[in-house]
Amino acid sequence: NVHAPRTGNGMDFNDGEYRMYHGKHIPGFPAHPHRGFETITATLQGFCDHCDSLGNAGRYGEGDCQFMTAGSGIQHSEMFPLVKSDQPNTLRLFQIWLNLPRADKMAPPKMVMHWANDVPKVRSPDGLATVSVYVGRYGTVAEALAPPPRSWAAKAGKDVAVWFVHMKPGARLELPAAHAGAEANRCLYVVEGDAVDVGGVRVPLRHMVDLDASRPVEVSGSQDTDTAALVLQGVPIGEPVAQRGPFVGNDMQDIVAAFSDYQETSFGGWPWPSEEHAFDMNKARFCLVDGVETVAPPVVPSSQP
Protein backbone atom coordinates (compact mmCIF):
# COMPACT_ATOMS: atom_id res chain seq x y z
CA ASN A 1 0.00 0.00 0.00
CA VAL A 2 1.15 3.50 -0.82
CA HIS A 3 0.15 6.18 1.67
CA ALA A 4 0.56 9.93 1.45
CA PRO A 5 2.73 11.61 4.08
CA ARG A 6 0.69 13.65 6.53
CA THR A 7 2.04 17.13 5.78
CA GLY A 8 0.36 20.49 5.65
CA ASN A 9 -2.61 21.60 7.68
CA GLY A 10 -5.53 21.01 5.32
CA MET A 11 -5.51 24.55 3.99
CA ASP A 12 -5.42 24.93 0.22
CA PHE A 13 -2.91 27.78 0.32
CA ASN A 14 -0.46 28.99 2.93
CA ASP A 15 2.14 31.72 2.90
CA GLY A 16 5.01 30.45 0.82
CA GLU A 17 4.86 26.70 0.15
CA TYR A 18 1.69 25.22 -1.32
CA ARG A 19 0.35 22.51 0.98
CA MET A 20 -2.78 20.41 0.77
CA TYR A 21 -3.86 17.34 2.63
CA HIS A 22 -7.30 15.91 3.21
CA GLY A 23 -8.04 12.24 3.78
CA LYS A 24 -6.39 9.67 6.03
CA HIS A 25 -4.29 7.75 3.54
CA ILE A 26 -4.78 9.32 0.09
CA PRO A 27 -4.64 13.07 -0.69
CA GLY A 28 -7.72 14.73 -2.07
CA PHE A 29 -11.15 15.89 -1.04
CA PRO A 30 -13.43 13.34 0.65
CA ALA A 31 -17.20 13.44 0.13
CA HIS A 32 -18.62 16.96 0.11
CA PRO A 33 -21.75 18.59 -1.36
CA HIS A 34 -22.39 21.09 -4.15
CA ARG A 35 -25.46 22.87 -5.50
CA GLY A 36 -26.25 25.59 -8.03
CA PHE A 37 -23.22 25.50 -10.34
CA GLU A 38 -20.92 23.06 -12.10
CA THR A 39 -17.30 22.03 -11.96
CA ILE A 40 -14.98 21.70 -14.94
CA THR A 41 -11.91 19.69 -13.99
CA ALA A 42 -9.28 19.89 -16.72
CA THR A 43 -6.26 17.68 -16.06
CA LEU A 44 -2.68 17.94 -17.26
CA GLN A 45 -0.78 15.32 -15.27
CA GLY A 46 -1.68 12.72 -12.66
CA PHE A 47 -5.04 11.21 -11.79
CA CYS A 48 -8.28 11.95 -9.93
CA ASP A 49 -10.71 9.35 -8.58
CA HIS A 50 -14.33 10.55 -8.60
CA CYS A 51 -17.24 9.05 -6.66
CA ASP A 52 -20.65 10.65 -6.14
CA SER A 53 -23.98 10.23 -4.41
CA LEU A 54 -25.65 9.04 -7.64
CA GLY A 55 -23.36 6.02 -7.80
CA ASN A 56 -21.29 7.45 -10.64
CA ALA A 57 -17.53 7.14 -10.54
CA GLY A 58 -14.37 7.41 -12.57
CA ARG A 59 -10.61 7.67 -12.71
CA TYR A 60 -9.40 10.38 -15.06
CA GLY A 61 -6.29 12.42 -15.74
CA GLU A 62 -3.39 12.92 -18.15
CA GLY A 63 -5.37 15.41 -20.25
CA ASP A 64 -8.94 14.22 -19.59
CA CYS A 65 -11.67 16.75 -18.73
CA GLN A 66 -14.66 16.12 -16.46
CA PHE A 67 -17.81 18.25 -16.47
CA MET A 68 -20.10 17.88 -13.44
CA THR A 69 -23.35 19.81 -13.22
CA ALA A 70 -24.18 19.91 -9.51
CA GLY A 71 -27.59 21.43 -10.19
CA SER A 72 -30.12 20.58 -7.49
CA GLY A 73 -27.47 18.94 -5.34
CA ILE A 74 -24.87 16.20 -5.32
CA GLN A 75 -22.14 14.84 -3.08
CA HIS A 76 -18.85 13.85 -4.64
CA SER A 77 -15.31 13.00 -3.63
CA GLU A 78 -12.12 13.84 -5.49
CA MET A 79 -9.20 11.71 -4.35
CA PHE A 80 -5.77 11.71 -5.95
CA PRO A 81 -4.64 8.08 -6.13
CA LEU A 82 -1.03 7.17 -5.46
CA VAL A 83 -0.56 4.94 -8.49
CA LYS A 84 3.26 5.01 -8.42
CA SER A 85 5.26 3.51 -5.58
CA ASP A 86 8.72 4.29 -6.93
CA GLN A 87 8.40 7.96 -7.92
CA PRO A 88 6.37 11.10 -7.10
CA ASN A 89 2.66 11.09 -7.92
CA THR A 90 2.60 14.58 -9.44
CA LEU A 91 -0.82 16.14 -9.99
CA ARG A 92 -1.51 19.14 -12.23
CA LEU A 93 -5.08 20.18 -12.96
CA PHE A 94 -7.48 23.11 -13.00
CA GLN A 95 -10.94 23.09 -11.48
CA ILE A 96 -13.14 25.90 -12.76
CA TRP A 97 -16.48 26.65 -11.14
CA LEU A 98 -19.03 27.66 -13.77
CA ASN A 99 -22.21 29.27 -12.50
CA LEU A 100 -25.70 28.22 -13.58
CA PRO A 101 -28.56 30.63 -14.32
CA ARG A 102 -31.57 30.61 -12.03
CA ALA A 103 -33.55 28.51 -14.52
CA ASP A 104 -30.98 25.68 -14.30
CA LYS A 105 -29.77 25.84 -10.70
CA MET A 106 -32.11 22.97 -9.75
CA ALA A 107 -31.39 20.88 -12.84
CA PRO A 108 -30.74 17.17 -12.27
CA PRO A 109 -27.04 16.51 -11.56
CA LYS A 110 -25.08 15.27 -14.56
CA MET A 111 -21.51 14.08 -15.20
CA VAL A 112 -19.80 14.03 -18.60
CA MET A 113 -16.27 12.77 -19.28
CA HIS A 114 -14.14 13.93 -22.21
CA TRP A 115 -11.12 11.69 -22.69
CA ALA A 116 -7.78 13.29 -23.51
CA ASN A 117 -7.73 11.96 -27.07
CA ASP A 118 -11.03 13.78 -27.72
CA VAL A 119 -9.80 17.15 -26.38
CA PRO A 120 -8.89 19.19 -29.50
CA LYS A 121 -5.31 20.42 -29.74
CA VAL A 122 -4.42 23.40 -31.94
CA ARG A 123 -0.81 23.95 -32.95
CA SER A 124 0.51 27.44 -33.66
CA PRO A 125 1.94 28.16 -37.12
CA ASP A 126 5.49 28.18 -35.72
CA GLY A 127 4.91 24.75 -34.14
CA LEU A 128 6.02 26.00 -30.73
CA ALA A 129 2.66 26.45 -29.01
CA THR A 130 -0.24 24.08 -28.38
CA VAL A 131 -3.75 25.09 -27.28
CA SER A 132 -5.85 22.42 -25.54
CA VAL A 133 -9.51 23.29 -26.14
CA TYR A 134 -11.23 21.85 -23.06
CA VAL A 135 -14.45 23.83 -23.51
CA GLY A 136 -15.95 25.83 -26.37
CA ARG A 137 -14.67 26.82 -29.79
CA TYR A 138 -11.26 28.03 -30.84
CA GLY A 139 -11.96 30.31 -33.79
CA THR A 140 -13.12 28.20 -36.72
CA VAL A 141 -10.51 25.45 -36.37
CA ALA A 142 -11.50 23.50 -33.25
CA GLU A 143 -14.49 22.80 -31.03
CA ALA A 144 -14.62 20.83 -27.79
CA LEU A 145 -17.09 18.02 -27.17
CA ALA A 146 -20.53 18.95 -25.89
CA PRO A 147 -20.92 19.94 -22.21
CA PRO A 148 -23.83 18.64 -20.09
CA PRO A 149 -27.21 19.73 -21.52
CA ARG A 150 -28.10 22.23 -18.77
CA SER A 151 -24.64 23.84 -18.66
CA TRP A 152 -24.27 27.57 -19.37
CA ALA A 153 -21.64 26.41 -21.86
CA ALA A 154 -24.38 24.52 -23.75
CA LYS A 155 -26.47 27.65 -24.31
CA ALA A 156 -26.41 29.07 -27.83
CA GLY A 157 -24.41 32.26 -28.08
CA LYS A 158 -22.89 32.17 -24.58
CA ASP A 159 -19.45 31.32 -26.03
CA VAL A 160 -17.98 29.73 -22.91
CA ALA A 161 -14.39 28.64 -23.48
CA VAL A 162 -11.59 27.08 -21.44
CA TRP A 163 -8.22 26.88 -23.20
CA PHE A 164 -4.83 25.81 -21.89
CA VAL A 165 -1.96 27.36 -23.83
CA HIS A 166 1.46 25.73 -23.59
CA MET A 167 4.36 27.59 -25.19
CA LYS A 168 7.91 26.43 -25.82
CA PRO A 169 10.68 29.06 -25.76
CA GLY A 170 10.16 31.67 -28.47
CA ALA A 171 6.57 30.64 -29.23
CA ARG A 172 4.14 33.12 -30.79
CA LEU A 173 0.47 32.62 -31.54
CA GLU A 174 -2.68 34.63 -32.13
CA LEU A 175 -5.75 33.91 -30.01
CA PRO A 176 -8.85 34.30 -32.19
CA ALA A 177 -11.65 36.71 -31.35
CA ALA A 178 -14.66 35.34 -29.49
CA HIS A 179 -17.67 34.43 -31.57
CA ALA A 180 -19.79 36.48 -29.16
CA GLY A 181 -17.53 39.49 -29.67
CA ALA A 182 -17.56 42.17 -27.00
CA GLU A 183 -20.50 40.49 -25.22
CA ALA A 184 -18.06 37.91 -23.86
CA ASN A 185 -15.66 38.40 -20.99
CA ARG A 186 -12.19 36.95 -21.52
CA CYS A 187 -9.14 36.71 -19.27
CA LEU A 188 -5.70 35.11 -19.48
CA TYR A 189 -3.84 33.85 -16.41
CA VAL A 190 -0.16 32.93 -16.54
CA VAL A 191 0.18 29.69 -14.60
CA GLU A 192 3.64 28.27 -15.32
CA GLY A 193 7.05 29.40 -16.45
CA ASP A 194 7.95 33.03 -16.95
CA ALA A 195 6.14 36.20 -18.01
CA VAL A 196 4.05 36.20 -21.19
CA ASP A 197 3.66 39.06 -23.66
CA VAL A 198 -0.03 39.64 -24.43
CA GLY A 199 -0.72 42.26 -27.07
CA GLY A 200 2.47 44.09 -26.14
CA VAL A 201 1.80 43.95 -22.38
CA ARG A 202 4.10 41.90 -20.14
CA VAL A 203 2.03 39.66 -17.85
CA PRO A 204 4.13 38.11 -15.04
CA LEU A 205 3.75 34.60 -13.68
CA ARG A 206 0.59 34.15 -11.55
CA HIS A 207 -0.94 37.35 -12.87
CA MET A 208 -4.12 37.78 -14.89
CA VAL A 209 -5.04 40.20 -17.65
CA ASP A 210 -8.52 41.01 -18.97
CA LEU A 211 -8.77 40.92 -22.76
CA ASP A 212 -11.04 42.49 -25.36
CA ALA A 213 -12.77 39.34 -26.57
CA SER A 214 -13.95 41.04 -29.76
CA ARG A 215 -10.39 41.21 -31.11
CA PRO A 216 -7.69 38.63 -31.80
CA VAL A 217 -4.58 39.09 -29.67
CA GLU A 218 -0.98 37.99 -30.12
CA VAL A 219 0.63 36.04 -27.29
CA SER A 220 4.36 35.39 -27.02
CA GLY A 221 6.11 33.10 -24.58
CA SER A 222 9.44 33.47 -22.86
CA GLN A 223 12.62 33.18 -24.91
CA ASP A 224 14.23 30.98 -22.25
CA THR A 225 11.66 28.66 -20.67
CA ASP A 226 8.40 26.88 -21.34
CA THR A 227 5.39 28.95 -20.29
CA ALA A 228 1.70 28.17 -19.88
CA ALA A 229 -1.48 30.19 -19.56
CA LEU A 230 -5.15 29.51 -18.92
CA VAL A 231 -7.75 31.40 -20.97
CA LEU A 232 -11.32 31.68 -19.63
CA GLN A 233 -14.19 33.20 -21.60
CA GLY A 234 -17.96 33.53 -21.63
CA VAL A 235 -20.96 35.81 -21.87
CA PRO A 236 -22.00 36.81 -18.32
CA ILE A 237 -25.19 35.30 -16.90
CA GLY A 238 -26.22 38.70 -15.60
CA GLU A 239 -27.94 37.56 -12.40
CA PRO A 240 -27.19 38.19 -8.71
CA VAL A 241 -24.79 35.71 -7.12
CA ALA A 242 -24.81 34.45 -3.53
CA GLN A 243 -22.21 31.88 -2.47
CA ARG A 244 -21.37 30.15 0.77
CA GLY A 245 -18.87 27.32 0.74
CA PRO A 246 -20.02 24.64 -1.72
CA PHE A 247 -23.37 26.25 -2.58
CA VAL A 248 -24.14 28.95 -5.17
CA GLY A 249 -27.51 30.67 -5.48
CA ASN A 250 -29.04 33.97 -6.53
CA ASP A 251 -29.72 35.18 -2.99
CA MET A 252 -29.23 34.14 0.62
CA GLN A 253 -32.62 32.43 0.64
CA ASP A 254 -31.20 29.96 -1.90
CA ILE A 255 -28.19 29.35 0.33
CA VAL A 256 -30.31 28.73 3.44
CA ALA A 257 -32.45 26.30 1.44
CA ALA A 258 -29.35 24.47 0.20
CA PHE A 259 -28.00 23.93 3.71
CA SER A 260 -31.44 22.81 4.92
CA ASP A 261 -31.96 20.39 2.02
CA TYR A 262 -28.50 18.91 2.44
CA GLN A 263 -29.00 18.36 6.16
CA GLU A 264 -32.34 16.65 5.46
CA THR A 265 -31.47 14.55 2.40
CA SER A 266 -27.65 14.39 2.14
CA PHE A 267 -28.33 14.88 -1.58
CA GLY A 268 -28.94 11.17 -1.98
CA GLY A 269 -26.59 9.80 0.66
CA TRP A 270 -23.26 8.10 0.08
CA PRO A 271 -23.22 4.64 -1.59
CA TRP A 272 -19.44 4.09 -1.36
CA PRO A 273 -17.44 2.22 1.31
CA SER A 274 -15.88 5.41 2.66
CA GLU A 275 -16.03 9.15 2.17
CA GLU A 276 -12.52 9.09 0.70
CA HIS A 277 -12.98 6.05 -1.51
CA ALA A 278 -10.29 5.47 -4.12
CA PHE A 279 -9.84 2.67 -6.60
CA ASP A 280 -7.06 0.10 -6.88
CA MET A 281 -3.77 1.71 -7.85
CA ASN A 282 -3.57 -0.52 -10.94
CA LYS A 283 -7.04 0.30 -12.24
CA ALA A 284 -7.04 1.99 -15.64
CA ARG A 285 -8.86 5.25 -16.41
CA PHE A 286 -12.62 4.67 -16.60
CA CYS A 287 -15.99 6.35 -16.28
CA LEU A 288 -19.09 4.86 -14.65
CA VAL A 289 -22.31 6.78 -15.36
CA ASP A 290 -25.83 5.48 -14.75
CA GLY A 291 -24.50 1.97 -14.25
CA VAL A 292 -22.58 1.84 -17.54
CA GLU A 293 -18.78 1.70 -17.37
CA THR A 294 -16.52 2.79 -20.20
CA VAL A 295 -12.74 2.43 -20.28
CA ALA A 296 -10.59 5.26 -21.57
CA PRO A 297 -8.46 4.70 -24.65
CA PRO A 298 -4.69 4.96 -24.16
CA VAL A 299 -3.47 8.54 -24.22
CA VAL A 300 -1.73 9.45 -27.47
CA PRO A 301 1.64 11.01 -26.52
CA SER A 302 2.08 14.71 -27.28
CA SER A 303 4.86 17.23 -26.89
CA GLN A 304 2.94 19.07 -24.18
CA PRO A 305 4.34 18.32 -20.70
Image (cartoon, helix red, strand yellow):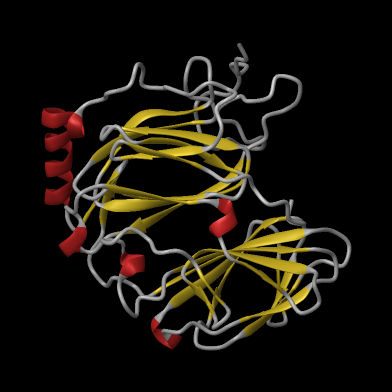
Q: Nearer the viewer, residue 217 or 2?
A: 2
Q: Nearer the viewer, residue 131 or 57?
A: 57
Q: Quadrant of the N terminus?
A: top right
Q: Residue 24 appears at what percent x and percent y?
A: 48, 15
From this view, report whether residue 265 is shown above or below residue 41. Answer: above
Residue at screen point 49% across, 74% down: 137
Q: Give the left or right position of residue 146, taking residue 89 as reference.
A: left
Q: Residue 49 appears at what percent x and percent y?
A: 48, 32
Q: Give the left or right position of residue 138, taking residue 98 as reference.
A: right
Q: Residue 26 appears at what percent x and percent y?
A: 53, 21
From this view, report whether residue 199 is shown above or below residue 97. Answer: below
From this view, report whether residue 146 is shown above or below residue 35. Answer: below
Q: Residue furthest right?
A: 224
Residue at screen point 81% across, 63% down: 168
| Quarter occupied by residue 149 | bottom left
Residue at screen point 60% across, 15% down: 3
| Quarter occupied by residue 30 | top left
Q: Nearer the viewer, residue 170 or 9?
A: 170
Q: Give the left or right position of residue 92, taking residue 107 as reference.
A: right
